[in-house]
Image (cartoon, helix red, strand yellow):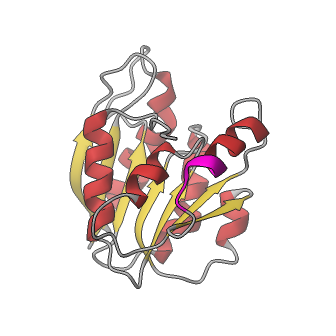
Amino acid sequence: MVEPPLMQEREIALLCELAGQVVPDREIVEIGSYAGGSAQRMAAVPGRGAHITCIDPWDSDYAGDEIMERFLAVVDWSAVTALRGLSHEIARLWMKPIGLLFIDAEHSYPSVLADYQAWSGFIPSGGFLVFHDYSRTPRRSTPWTEGTCKVVNQTVMPSGLWTPLAEMDPVLKDGGGLWAGVRN
């Protein structure tokens, strides 16, 4: 079974390219896994050496038990571990260095900021940070990008910790947009 990622093809291509560069002693962490489409694609990257941890509460009308069942049916369990819970709570117990952090969970400003603050400290120099549903300038036609945009533009970029790698504005009316950077 193939679960299509809720991303534009150019976005998933970049995400998979970065996943393929993560060394085996670092983890790929996806916050907000929904039905597993992006995790499935990252796990299939030839030569990918890093393990993937997917974190999602799978507890709402948007992504409840039915969506989690779809996730469980598609992921490669030799490459993926699923953790059901709130990302900021799981971060308190985390101990591994992260080579790629992919944030694509709840898109409000407080939630995106909390995910960034809880997890970015685990990314050493050379590690990647990717936000989905980003737009440099949020528009009324892309309101879901507002929280991500605000975190990247007001917290991530001014910190001086990241060198931007890619920025893709949304081209779909119902989703998309991406920002990627590498830790200095």
Q: Is residue 73 in the magenta section?
A: yes
Task: Give the vertical position of 166 relative to 126 (above or below).
Answer: above
> Horizontal and vertical percent for residue 6?
46, 34
Left or right: where 119 falls relative to 101: right
Q: Is residue 113 visible?
A: yes
Which residues lie in the magenta part? 72-76
Task: Give the vertical position of 143 relative to 22 (above or below).
Answer: above
> Horizontal and vertical percent for residue 96?
53, 82
Task: Give the vertical position of 8 relative to 171 (above or below).
Answer: below
| Residue at figure coordinates x 44%, y 15% from the top left | 140
| Residue at figure coordinates x 63%, y 77% from the top left | 94
The image quarter in which residue 176 lies: top left
> Horizontal and vertical percent for residue 130?
38, 53
The image quarter in which residue 181 lies: bottom left
Q: Is residue 160 in the magenta section?
A: no
**Considering depth in this image, is 120 or 137 the residue closer to the camera?**
120
Left or right: where 106 falls relative to 154: right
